[in-house]
Image (cartoon, rainbow, N blue to C red):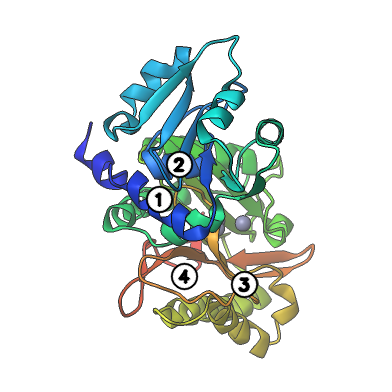
Amino acid sequence: MTTESSELYPVTRIARVREAVAASGLDALLLTPGPDLRYVCGYDAHALERLTCLVVPAAGEAFMMVPRLELPAAQASPAGRTGVEFVPWDETDDPYAVVAKRLGTVGAVGLADRMWAMQSLRFREALPGAEQALAGRVLRELRMRKSPAEAAALRAAGAAIDAVHELVPSLLRAGRTERQVGRDIADAIMNAGHATIDFVIVGSGPNSASPHHELSDRVIQPGDPVVVDIGGTMPSGYCSDSTRNYVVGEPGKEYLAYFEVLRRAQEVACEFVKPGVTCEAVDAAAREVIADAGYGEYFIHRTGHGIGLESHEEPYIVAGNTELMAPGFAFSIEPGIYLPGRHGARIEDIVICGESGGERLNLTTRDLVVVG
Ligand code: ZN
Ligand code: ZN
Ligand code: ZN
């Protein structure tokens, strides 16, 4: 076991979560494979139809239901050193009934936010008296405040995706398709140390005006602005996500004019970050700069999303979110301006809220990069 994983997934976390469950009024959390399970005990289990489930009761010891064939994998994971009891089940057992029997009478349970519907319905049958809620109600408070080890893992993810953006100018030129460039970027994401590629967006010319365009066979033309938004998951489990803007040759005047506005909006929002400001105020800080310049209607999405074990998680940087920023919050700041059918741009950094301000984890130039 590396020191890194024992710091990232401390063995004391299950006890802390149990206290939070007790304080929440829920009787237990039921955590199937996914980011909630990984956060609580470090086990990056495959999500399959056979039930793997960490049960964290408000009172009493946590235990994990594990298909017998996966017991060695569970024991070898960081969960193996937490002291949690593994309860292996055989192919003909009903693991849902075992959980129900062990829990006894319960009034309310919290289900992992990403539990499969087939599993949540099986739990509903097995625990007919229990109200079902989201485990996120309990875990969000913990997961939003990144520990120093989690912040370090996000910093490493930021450096890895920065290394990929440094390579983009050598991959991007007129005559190549978005898909060709995207394949090279995908290789670079893996070579930079990620365990998986989460997304590769190469939006050239008019495609740059579509925020979630991924890749197409469009041939990149001279004069095209290109939005490159890329991210992956590191072996630690923590994610990267960064957007930069490139132009092949000479950019147009109008594009340059709003790119400067966008550049300033992203800067202002990053500088606005500090403990005690609301998430919606950070969104408003970016939006105001863009609206004042007359491009308000072209900024069609929220300013950002939290990031950690998921590339999109709480807190969301959006109007209506009055959550107060606190040290350890990690999220993207990614305003964009999109002229439909024509072109667009987005600048995105991951930011961690510190004691007195924000720290950006993506450090490559935010200026327009001219290539080819
Ligand atoms: Zn997005
Ligand atoms: Zn993002
Ligand atoms: Zn992104």
Q: Are marks 1 and 2 in contact (CB under 8 Å)?
A: yes
- According to the picture, the residue beneath numbered tag 2 turns out to be 56
Mark 1 or mark 3: name the one nearer the start of the chain: 1
Residues packed near mark 1 inside 10 Å, few (<14), some (14 to 19) or many (20 plus): some
State how far apart marks 1 and 3 are (Cα).
Answer: 28 Å
Q: Nearer the viewer, mark 1 or mark 4?
A: 1
Residue sitting farthest toward the bottom: 292
Q: Position of residue 198 (x, y in %)?
A: 54, 42
Mark 1 or mark 4: name the one nearer the start of the chain: 1
Residues packed near mark 4 inside 10 Å, few (<14), some (14 to 19) or many (20 plus): few
Q: Position of residue 187 (x, y in %)?
A: 46, 35
Where residue 297 sits, quadrant-wise, is: bottom right
Check disc 3 and report its element: helix, strand or loop.
loop
Where residue 118 sits, quadrant-wise, is: top right
State how far apart marks 1 and 4 are (Cα).
Answer: 43 Å
| The disc label shown at residue 318, or none | 3
Mark 3 or mark 4: name the one nearer the start of the chain: 3
Check disc 1 and report its element: helix, strand or loop.
helix
Kindly identify the amino acid type of the residue bearing the numbered disc 2. Answer: Val
- According to the picture, the residue beneath numbered tag 4 turns out to be 367
- According to the picture, the residue beneath numbered tag 1 turns out to be 17
Mark 3 or mark 2: name the one nearer the start of the chain: 2
